[in-house]
Amino acid sequence: MIPFETLLALVVFVFASSVTPGPNNLMLTASGINYGFVRTIPHMLGIPGGVMLLCLLVAFGLGAIFNSYPLLQETLKWLGCAYLLYLSWCIARATPIANQAEGVSSESKPFTFLQSVSFQFVNPKAWVMVISAMSSFTLTGEDYVASALLVTLVFAIVNLPSISLWAGFGSVLRKLMTDPRKLRVINLALAGLTAGSVLLIIG
């Protein structure tokens, strides 16, 4: 099985990849601001769920398909960028739930579990995380399957508490900033950062 030193390096890699800014964490912050921590939980749970599915797909064949058909990966990247821009627009237009209670209408809703799972398939950062982990930390030969499953398990364990920090941060901001205008500015800033992440992806 994976040596302890390699396992420790894997945990550090997954934590660093999960806790650093990216589309998932920016959207969790926005969701925490607009809907609170509790209503963001399905969104949070869907992220490790989707990442685990990606791990299994990459470990057992999809990575090889991407190597054979790079156009497929390129197409997925552009679909992900387009979806990120759409989500940026949704964040910019979101109305905090406190405002909705005061009669301000909004059609925005927090991500459901299945929406969050599905988003990982068009999230370029998630693909980079998973492909990097599977190529760097799995073993060859008879130990491959067990090591691939272990990588998937580490993602499941480490990812959730890492990303929950961002939803918690958003919910704290929501409590501290009761002025709707300030929350609106924060939403616009998060929307801009989410849209800006597209530049990093295509660059």
Image: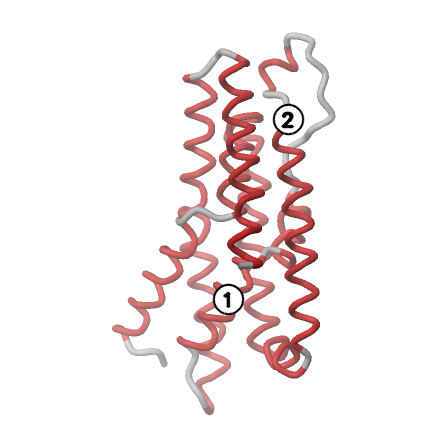
Q: Amino acid at mark 2?
A: Ala
Res 94 label? 2
Query: Which quarter of the picture shows residue 158?
Result: bottom left
Quadrant (top left, top right, bottom left, bottom right) of the N terminus: bottom left
What crowding class fits label 1: few (fewer than 14 Cα within 10 Å), some (14-19), or many (20 or more)? many
Residue 120 percent across, percent down from the top left: 60, 55
Q: Which mark is residue 77?
A: none
Q: Secondary structure at mark 1?
A: helix
Name the residue at the left extreme: 5
Which residue is pictured at 43% across the width and 24% down the height? 173
Above or below: residue 4 compared with residue 202: below
SS at mark 2 in the image: loop
Give the tally of numbered discs: 2
Q: Nearer the viewer, residue 106 or 193?
A: 193
- Crowd rating for badge 2 (residues with CA inside 10 Å; few <14, some 14–19, many 20+): many
Q: Front-most of 99 and 139?
A: 99
Which of the labelled discs sits on residue 130, or is there none?
1
Which residue is most to the bottom?
Answer: 141
Q: Residue at x 45, y 45 (%)?
A: 163
Residue 87, located in which quarter of the rendered image?
A: top right
Residue 172, image x, y percentages: 41, 25
Calculate the distance from the C-alpha at mark 2 to the C-alpha at mark 1.
30 Å
In the displayed structure, would residue 61 be above or below residue 8?
below
Q: Amino acid at mark 1?
A: Val
Give the mark toward the camera: 2 or 1: 2
Q: Residue furthest front?
A: 203
Q: Earlier in the sequence, mark 2 or mark 1?
A: 2
Q: Nearer the viewer, residue 150 or 174?
A: 174
> What residue is rendered at 46% in x and 70% in y?
132
